[in-house]
Amino acid sequence: MKQFKRKVIVEVGELTFDSAKLHIEFDVPFDDDTDPDESEIRIYNLSASSINQMKRNQKLVLKAGYEGDVGVLMEGRISYITSRMDGGDKVTRIGVIDGPDLTNIKVKNKAFKKGVRASQILSALVPLLKLPVAAFRLPKDKTYAKGYSVSGAIVDNLAQITKECGASFYVNKGRLYIRPLSVGDDTRFVLKPSTGLIKSPEFFQDDDGVKGYQVQCLLQHRITTASIIDIESKFVKGRFRARRGSHICNADEFMTSFEVVENVVR
């Protein structure tokens, strides 16, 4: 890993901003809940022409990494653009939401017959969100003997049904995922000191009894929600699933901080 050759690229429409020419910072969270993640990108001393070409709801793609190893951290739609002076620099802050706003997509009293399965309900509701589906897999396909009625925000209903089936439902990089909590995407990446692990992972156990580790490493674009990674440190070795975290880039840091949980399957 050529850690000394950091790269950040921001793409908005026909515009491309490169850290080789501009100072760029960002905070990019990721998790597996249904609330859209909102990132912030800060670009220093952009021209007025570039700022004026960016519009709210426009698609933005953020890439980062190192010379020869750059990948997508986040893609979404612009939620706000503000510029102000900070000392001698003009700082443009760009808010980006991962995917469209799904909370306003609603249905009124849609009824499903007795004996309907969860997969049938989901298959009827998911297309209404108009998002590409990256994964659709239920560990348990619950049957609703008395039928099922859907009303209100579709995402709320999807979250409830998938939870009852032992699955997670979330949007990541503009794509929709429904799959078992223990399933993820194999990155084929081993995180160890020589590949960017900053310090030994710290153990945690949350209120639901879920066990895992808090991990910090040099910024790694392969790590996001449900990434399956192998960790090799002095005291922690094994295969884990990333649950939530953030990518951070500023004057002092270029890192990924995240939680991993145990008991994963491919």
Image (tube, helix red, strand yellow):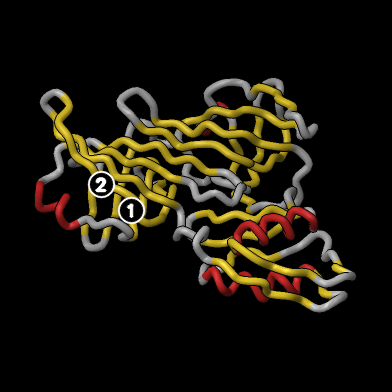
What residue appears at the point 10 percent right and 46 percent down from the top-left corner?
Answer: 47
> How many other residues sit within 10 Å of disc 2, few (<14), some (14-19) or many (≥20)?
some
Q: Eyeballing the image, is 59 above or below 202?
A: below
| Three-letter code, disc 1 | Ile
x, y percentage for residue 235?
71, 21
Q: Is residue 188 visible?
A: no
Q: Nearer the viewer, residue 88 or 130?
A: 130
x, y percentage for residue 72?
42, 51
Image quadrant where residue 66 sits: top left
Tag shown at residue 81: 2
**Would you say the residues marked 1 and 2 are in contact, meaning their CB atoms lie under 8 Å apart?**
yes
The residue beneath circle 1 is 78
x, y percentage for residue 21?
18, 41
Image quadrant where residue 252 sits: top left
The furthest residue to the front? 109
- Say what secondary structure mark 2 lies in: strand
x, y percentage for residue 97?
42, 51
What residue appears at the point 50 percent right and 50 percent down from the top-left corner?
Answer: 36
Q: Eyeballing the image, is 11 above or below 204?
A: below
